[in-house]
Amino acid sequence: MVKIQGLSISQVCKDMKIGESAVRRWVSQFETEQHGQSGTGKPLTAEHQRIRQLELENRQRRGEVEVLKKQYCDRVVKNLHRRAEEFGYKLPVV
C-alpha cells in the first residue's frame, strides 16, 4: 500500500491499526528484496520465497549426500576388511 498506492506509513498504520515500526520494517524489507538482495525475516516477494525454498532444499540434499558418502565409505572399509581376512590379513581399525 505504501509503495504501490503511494500512501504514507502513518496513514496505513491508522487504517490497519498496526504499529509504525512493523510497517517500516516491511517496507524496508520489500525495498531490499526489490533490489535483488535477501531481506531479513520471511520473504515478501514470491521470487524470494522460492529462492529460500530452493536454498532449504539444497541444504537438505547436501546433508543427504554426506550421509550417502559416509555409508558408502563404511561399506567399502567393511568389504576391504572382509577381503583382507579372507586372505589371512588383519587390517587395523581406523
Image: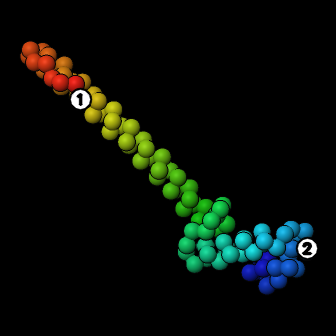
- Which quadrant of the figure contains the C terminus? top left
Asked if 32 appears above or below 84 in the picture, the reply is: below
Colouring style: rainbow
- Which quadrant of the figure contains the N terminus? bottom right
70 sits to left or right of 62: left
Q: Position of residue 79 (x, y in %)?
A: 21, 24
User: 84 and 57: which one is in front?
Assistant: 84
Q: Do we see residue 47 in this rendering? A: no
Nearest to viewer (mark 1 / mark 2): 1
Q: Which residue is mark 1?
A: 94
Asked if 19 appears above or below 71 in the picture, the reply is: below
Secondary element at tag 2:
helix
Is tag 1's residue or tag 2's residue first in the polypeptide sequence?
2
Three-letter amino acid code of the residue under disc 2? Asp
**Which quadrant would residue 92 be assigned to in this image?**
top left
Q: Position of residue 75 (x, y in %)?
A: 27, 28
Name the residue at 61% across, 68% down. 39
Three-letter amino acid code of the residue under disc 1? Val
Secondary element at tag 1:
loop
Total marks placed: 2
Q: Do we see residue 10 in this rendering? A: yes
User: From mark 1 to mark 2, how far is it between C-alphas?
Assistant: 68 Å
**Residue 60 marker:** none
Asked if disc 1 and disc 2 are in contact, CB closer than 8 Å, the reply is: no
Q: Few, some or many C-alpha atoms within 10 Å of disc 2 (few <14, some 14-19, many ≥20)?
A: few
Name the residue at 67% across, 66% down. 44
Q: Which residue is mark 2?
A: 15
